[in-house]
Image (spheres, rainbow, N blue to C red):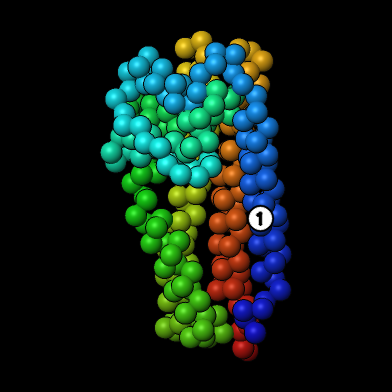
Amino acid sequence: MFFFDPRYFLFALPAMLFAMWAQYKVKSTFARYAQVPNMQGVSGLDVAQILMRNEQLQLQVHEVPGSLTDFYNPADKSINLSQTSTGGPSVAAMAVVAHELGHAVQDRDGYVPMRLRSSIVGVANIGSNMGPLLFFVGIIMGGAARGQGSIGWSVALLGLLLFAGAVVFTLATLPVELNASRRAREMLLRNGLVSTQEMAGVSQMLNAAALTYVAAAASAIANLLYYALILFGGGRRRN
């Protein structure tokens, strides 16, 4: 049966394990530095206010439930901070808030990679949802077995191409996130909010977070390669 194809695990399992490790890494690093107070004694919300004022950022600040659910919304120019980031004066909260404000600075400065990523959000959403569905529908219709020219193969190819758009989005996310982390470090230093010792903790937090985006890209690429193998490699072709 196609759905129990053991080859899938050759592609998906390494990426899956990497993603699990990346999630563990970011959560454990956050938990560690959430217990380390910053020397300025400022909360995540204080950091947001200081950086917005000094960096001349006109933003709305919203608190959202959860942990590590922080995000910047370019649509309404708002920074949305989780409850764990707005609370106590920790190094972890400082790093998370500064990273999200790094995205706000990107938006203000017209950072090209961010604009490119934003331009393909719609395609990525459609591709991530409809791509795999169309691909498997095409395969069920006999796309891999009957080969090029069949309706099933065409449907599967469409699904593959749509999913490829989602993969491009995950790849486009990497430079945006890495740049936001770089800007976060620079802002914290420029505004005198961190010491050299604290910067080591901030960097560990930001590097751990970056791993989750690398893992997401690796997982997407692994799935895309598997789909391509099934469609173009003939998977279960009949002679």
Seen in the picture, residue 2 relative to 9 is either above or below; the reply is below
Give the x, y percent position of residue 81.
Answer: 44, 36
* Residue positioned 41% across, 55% down in the render: 124
Position of the C terminus, as image quadrant, is bottom right
* Residue positioned 56% across, 44% down in the render: 213
Give the x, y percent position of residue 70.
Answer: 46, 39
* Residue positioned 35% across, 32% down in the render: 61
The answer to whether residue 168 is seen in the rendering is yes
Seen in the picture, residue 150 relative to 186 is either above or below; the reply is below
Position of the N terminus, as image quadrant, is bottom right
Seen in the picture, residue 136 relative to 206 is either above or below; the reply is below
**Mark 1 highlights which residue?**
15
Q: Which of the 4 image quadrants contains residue 222? A: bottom right
- As drawn, the residue found furthest toward the front would be 88
The answer to whether residue 115 is seen in the rendering is no
Give the x, y percent position of residue 24.
Answer: 67, 45
Please tell me how crowded label 1 is: few (under 14), some (14-19), or many (20+) other residues with Cα within 10 Å: many
- As drawn, the residue found furthest toward the bottom would be 239
Q: Secondary structure at mark 1?
A: helix
Seen in the picture, residue 25 relative to 123 is either above or below; the reply is above
Q: Which of the 4 image quadrants contains residue 103? A: top left
Q: Nearer the viewer, residue 35 or 140?
A: 35
* Kind of residue sitting beneath label 1: Ala
* Residue positioned 61% across, 66% down in the render: 226
